[in-house]
Image: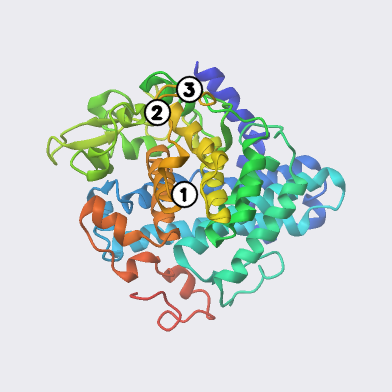
């Protein structure tokens, strides 16, 4: 029975009942909790940490990933999501949508600040502070890449109503400091599946360093993570991806580094299945419906050039729901036993071993301005697995170092990421990072991206509240 409902959603991150009691207080009126009466015991601080997850896991991440995927060179939005695929800036519906993301990321930041500020100094509380810093760094990493300069609300400034936008450089300084602290504070093995470990903080830091062009640092951290005991799950067919890596009954896997956890419990399911699936496939039939709002197209050049021998390609099904016979619907996340649109048991991966390997492959090559056998081997492990071969053994599909220049190898890594991380919300942010948005969007979709589309607008909910941000002069370009 869904592995005992994912073993109680991994005990709902350790303290299920505290989620409903304390989290409501933290979300609605944190100042009503007297610090001296609350942050005194491990269960109390753990409950405060749990409150950081709610705005991320329940209210944000599924729609956030879908919104990012619409803007990739592979996938398309339908209905209210369709303007995102036109790359002309956000319309009113999507401005409202991303406003919700902003609010929830900052709610997570606020709840993390409360833990960092109020937790006692004793050693037993140190891992909880590390977890709060990890989640704060994760939230700011999303904010700074999508909005650019943002207000930096920390435990020292959270009481200030009017706070100007901090430069991206300053935001990244906080992210780095938080993650370095988290690496030292978090356990090597999390006590509960779904909580971050030292390795989760380290791979996130590697990703941050890759974003900043600090390639030697990114390679070092990614290499340490990839050599720390994780292993890619072996696959032989499409169902292995669907059930052994992304399946609804998985509590954790050998390649999972950090994921948001879900289960078939009321209000605890993964909403992204309702966004992505079509009921005709019978892979997700809850409510007898589905939004199939973010889809692919078999005429996209990326899909046409993708080898049919790559098992990951089979995670797209042709479903004509009114847009023509070449419309593709993702079957990466499936749960035929979900009770309704909010009870799919599949977890949402944030970082897997594939991330560490491909970060290392690119960063090491860029750092040395050459393609080493180690960089190529990291890429080949991900590539082999996708074709059904053992990840750690030489195979007939291996790429060879001698065949690639540095630029050609970087393109190869970017391509492999495109195949590996569909519906994980990474492609659009990567195209911006490598500063080749127009090249890839033109190739994949035949469209030109206007400048205003590269950053989301600072929402009215912030400018109406925060007098330090003028809604005109301090707004992102084009809005």
Q: Position of residue 116 (x, y in %)?
A: 73, 56
Q: Residue at x 25, y 53 (%)?
A: 443
Residue sitting nearer the eye, 155 or 352:
352
Around disc 2, counting alpha carbons within 10 Å, would you say few (fewer than 14), some (14 to 19), or many (20 or more)?
few
The label number, if any, that marks residue 244 in the structure image: 3
- Which image quadrant: the C terminus? bottom left
**Label 2 vs label 1, nearer the camera:** 2
Mark 3: which secondary structure? helix
Q: Residue furthest right?
A: 122
Location of mark 2 (residue) = 397
Residue at (77%, 48%) from the top-left corner?
184
Closest to the camera, between mark 3 and mark 1, is 3
Q: Position of residue 79 (x, y in %)?
A: 23, 50
Q: Which residue is mark 1?
A: 60
Which residue is at the front of the view, 408 or 262? 408
Number of the front mark, 3 or 2? 2
- In the displayed orientation, state which residue is furthest to the front: 402
Relative placement, left or right, of 331 versus 381 is: left
């Amino acid at each position: 029975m869904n592995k005992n409902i994912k073993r109680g959603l991994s005990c709902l991150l350790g303290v299920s009942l505290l989620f409903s009691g304390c989290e409501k207080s933290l979300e609605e009126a944190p100042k009503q909790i007297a610090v001296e009466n609350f942050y005194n015991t491990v269960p109390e601080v753990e409950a405060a940490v749990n409150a950081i997850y709610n705005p991320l896991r329940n209210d944000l991440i599924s729609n956030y990933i879908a919104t990012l995927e619409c803007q990739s060179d592979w996938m398309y939005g339908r209905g209210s999501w369709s303007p995102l695929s036109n790359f002309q800036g956000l319309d009113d519906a999507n401005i409202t949508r991303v406003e919700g993301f902003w609010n929830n990321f900052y709610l997570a930041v606020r709840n993390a600040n409360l833990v960092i500020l109020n937790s006692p100094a004793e050693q037993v509380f140190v891992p909880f502070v590390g977890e709060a810093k990890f989640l704060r760094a994760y939230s700011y990493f999303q904010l700074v890449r999508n909005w650019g300069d943002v207000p930096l609300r920390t435990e020292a400034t959270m009481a200030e109503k009017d706070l100007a936008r901090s430069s991206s450089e300053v935001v990244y300084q906080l992210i780095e400091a938080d993650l370095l602290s988290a690496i030292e504070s978090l356990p090597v093995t999390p006590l509960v599946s779904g909580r971050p470990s030292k390795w989760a903080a380290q791979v996130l830091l590697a990703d941050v360093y890759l974003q900043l062009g600090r390639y030697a640092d990114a390679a070092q951290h990614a290499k340490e993570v990839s050599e720390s005991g994780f292993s890619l799950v072996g696959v032989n067919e499409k169902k292995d991806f669907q059930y052994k890596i992304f399946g609804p009954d998985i509590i954790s896997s050998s390649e999972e580094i950090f994921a948001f956890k879900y289960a078939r419990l009321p209000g605890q399911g993964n909403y992204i299945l309702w966004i992505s699936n079509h009921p005709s496939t019978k892979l997700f039939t809850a409510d007898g419906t589905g939004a199939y709002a973010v889809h692919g197209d078999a005429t996209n050049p990326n899909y046409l050039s993708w080898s049919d021998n790559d098992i990951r390609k089979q995670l797209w099904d042709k479903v004509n729901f009114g847009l023509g016979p070449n419309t593709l619907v993702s079957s990466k996340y499936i749960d035929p036993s979900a009770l309704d649109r909010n009870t799919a048991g599949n977890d949402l991966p944030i970082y897997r071993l594939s991330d560490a390997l491909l970060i290392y492959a690119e960063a090491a090559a860029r750092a040395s301005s050459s393609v080493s056998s180690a960089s190529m081997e990291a890429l080949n492990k991900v590539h082999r697995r996708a074709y059904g071969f053992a990840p750690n053994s030489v195979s007939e599909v291996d790429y060879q170092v001698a065949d690639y220049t540095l630029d050609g190898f970087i393109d190869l890594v970017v391509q492999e990421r495109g195949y590996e991380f569909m519906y994980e919300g990474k492609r659009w942010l990567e195209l911006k990072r490598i500063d080749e948005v127009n090249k890839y969007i033109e190739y994949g979709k035949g469209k030109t991206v206007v400048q205003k589309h590269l950053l989301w607008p600072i929402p009215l909910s912030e400018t109406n509240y925060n007098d330090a941000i003028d809604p005109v002069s301090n707004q992102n370009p084009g809005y």
